[in-house]
Amino acid sequence: MLLLSFPKSIGLIGSVLALRLIATTGVMATELKQGNPDQAKSVYEFVVNDIKGNPISMEKYRGHPLIIVNVASKCGYTEKHYAELNALYDEYAESKGLRILAFPCSQFSIGEATPDELQGCIKAHNVKFDVFEHVKVNGDDAHPLWQYLKKQQGGTIIDAIKWDYTKFIVDKNGVPVDRFAPTTDPLEMIADLKKYFVGGATPDEFQACLKAHNVKFDVFGTVKVNGDDAHPLWKYLKKQQDGTLIDTIKWDYTKFIVDKNGKPVDRFAPTTDPLKMIEDLKKYM
């Protein structure tokens, strides 16, 4: 009987271990898909779910200064924060490139119980910025993006998020650069935000810049080169001449050579000086 039962025991143990391995592998795969907070260099390495549960790469926000905030609809800070975050968005989204990313969380005050209630809260407060799926911001199962934010910008005494409406500023390189407590109103962050705004020149200032540099070539209206609303020309350029690792334009002064037939034939990083492109240009003259 012992000889008969021993192999069964081995088989049972093996099955249990296999189940554990499959479960653990599944969790690890999910974490890797969302991003690794211990190895990430920027927020662009993470994936989050939008309010409908669709995965969104944080690459979407490359080049934009960000406010990332955990929100809840049934909190004493809600009314003032939504109003002032909307005000910041109205003032700086178009002119300075600011994007605000709100993540509902129910780990503190009572959050939204259902997706319909969350949608109702967004509508009631006329929220204009991006709102995402519920996340956990503390604990072993906190979303990797939030683990990364806390790792880069620790809190007072402890790094844990202490309440709803903890706010992080992320610069246009995707690096978390500042953290604000729930007691700091969004409008009180303006002076700090301005350090990280994109561009910022008015049309008159831009014209003055062109004149000061004696610019002789054609200059066009402002466009977006990344994201769903990028100008179609720039989408085409990136499609024809992709970049290193990703096609996204990574910084100002990315340069494309287009031959005399209108075909994009080469791409140069911002770190390549224009005069170093002469030999490549000669091929197409």
Image (spheres, helix red, strand yellow):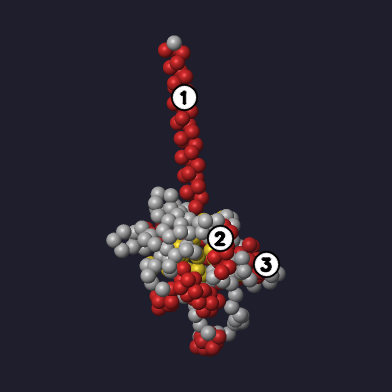
How many angstroms separate mark 2 from mark 1 (CA)?
46 Å
Residue displayed at 43% across by 77% down: 187
The nearer-to-camera label among 2 and 1 is 2
- Residue 210 horizontal side relative to residue 164, left or right: right
| Residue 262: x %, y % from top left | 69, 70
The nearer-to-camera label among 1 and 3 is 1
Q: Are marks 2 and 1 in contact (CB under 8 Å)?
A: no
Q: Which residue is mark 2?
A: 117
Rendered image: mark on residue 263? 3
| Residue 18: x %, y % from top left | 48, 31
Which residue in the rendered view is the most extreme toward the top? Answer: 1
Rendered image: mark on residue 12? 1
Say few, some or many: other residues with alpha carbon within 10 Å of mark 1 (under 14 / 14 to 19 / 20 or more). Answer: few
Disc 2 residue type (three-letter): Glu
| Of residues 244 and 178, the one drawn nearer to the viewer in this rendering | 178
Whichever of labels 3 and 2 marks the residue nearer the N terminus, that label is 2
Residue displayed at 41% across by 65% down: 166
- Circle 2 sits in a helix, a strand or a loop, which is it? helix
Whichever of labels 2 and 1 marks the residue nearer the N terminus, that label is 1
Which residue in the rendered view is the most extreme toward the right? Answer: 261
| Picture layout, residue 245 above or below residue 196 | above
